[in-house]
Image (cartoon, grey):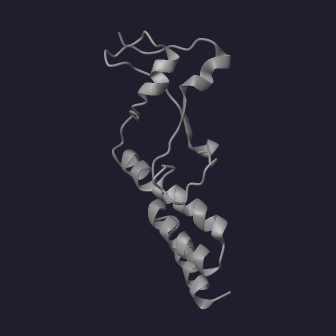
Amino acid sequence: MSETAVELIQAIQKNVSSDPLSKLLQVLILLAKEVNDSECERWAKLESNGYHKDNPALLEGDKIPSYRNVVGYYVDRFGRTVTVNQPELHFILEYALPTSAAELESLIAGRSSYLSVPDHRRFAFINPDFDD
């Protein structure tokens, strides 16, 4: 292993408890390049930059990992909440967060008790008459 790779590993180990994930992912990208691990590099770029179509690391067929799924509820522009009473349909309230690590960190730093995600296409699918 190269001296650079060892230094990058040490930097990650030293700062894992104090640095934000977005910064650690940048070091991991450098480390993955140094050791020629293209899959690790691609994963770190996806996590770092988000699972968006404009991210060159995102390949056709890639899915947002399940660890990025959150469960919530939908509210229309009038403040009405969609209720899903059937347990087999609770997946409707699951949302895969495509955002970058830095964006997720800023949401956490805001200490908001909820995350507002505009997803009008999914909302229309859940209940096309809900927003009348």
- Above or below — where is 12 with respect to 74? below
Residue at 60 percent across and 81 percent down: it is 34
Label total for image: 0
Q: Quadrant of residue 36?
A: bottom right
Q: Can residue 37 be seen in the rendering of this structure?
A: yes
Judging depth in this view, the residue of 128 and 33 nearest the camera is: 128
Judging depth in this view, the residue of 36 and 23 nearest the camera is: 36
Q: Can residue 73 be seen in the rendering of this structure?
A: no
Residue 29 is situated, as x and y percent measured from the top left of the image, at 54, 70
Q: Horizontally, is 88 left or right of 99 in the view? A: right
Judging depth in this view, the residue of 12 and 39 nearest the camera is: 39
- Above or below — where is 132 with respect to 92? above
* Residue that sits furthest to the bottom in the current view: 3
Q: Horizontally, is 46 left or right of 20 in the view? A: right
Residue at 36 percent across and 38 percent down: it is 112
- Above or below — where is 60 with respect to 6? above
Residue 14 is situated, as x and y percent measured from the top left of the image, at 53, 74
- Above or below — where is 60 with respect to 73? below
* Residue that sits furthest to the left in the current view: 78
Pick the quarter of the image with the N terminus.
bottom right
Residue at 41 percent across and 26 percent down: it is 120
Pick the quarter of the image with the C terminus.
top left
Judging depth in this view, the residue of 1 and 50 nearest the camera is: 50
Residue 82 is situated, as x and y percent measured from the top left of the image, at 47, 15
Residue at 37 percent across and 13 percent down: it is 131
Residue 31 is situated, as x and y percent measured from the top left of the image, at 58, 76
Q: Quadrant of residue 13?
A: bottom right
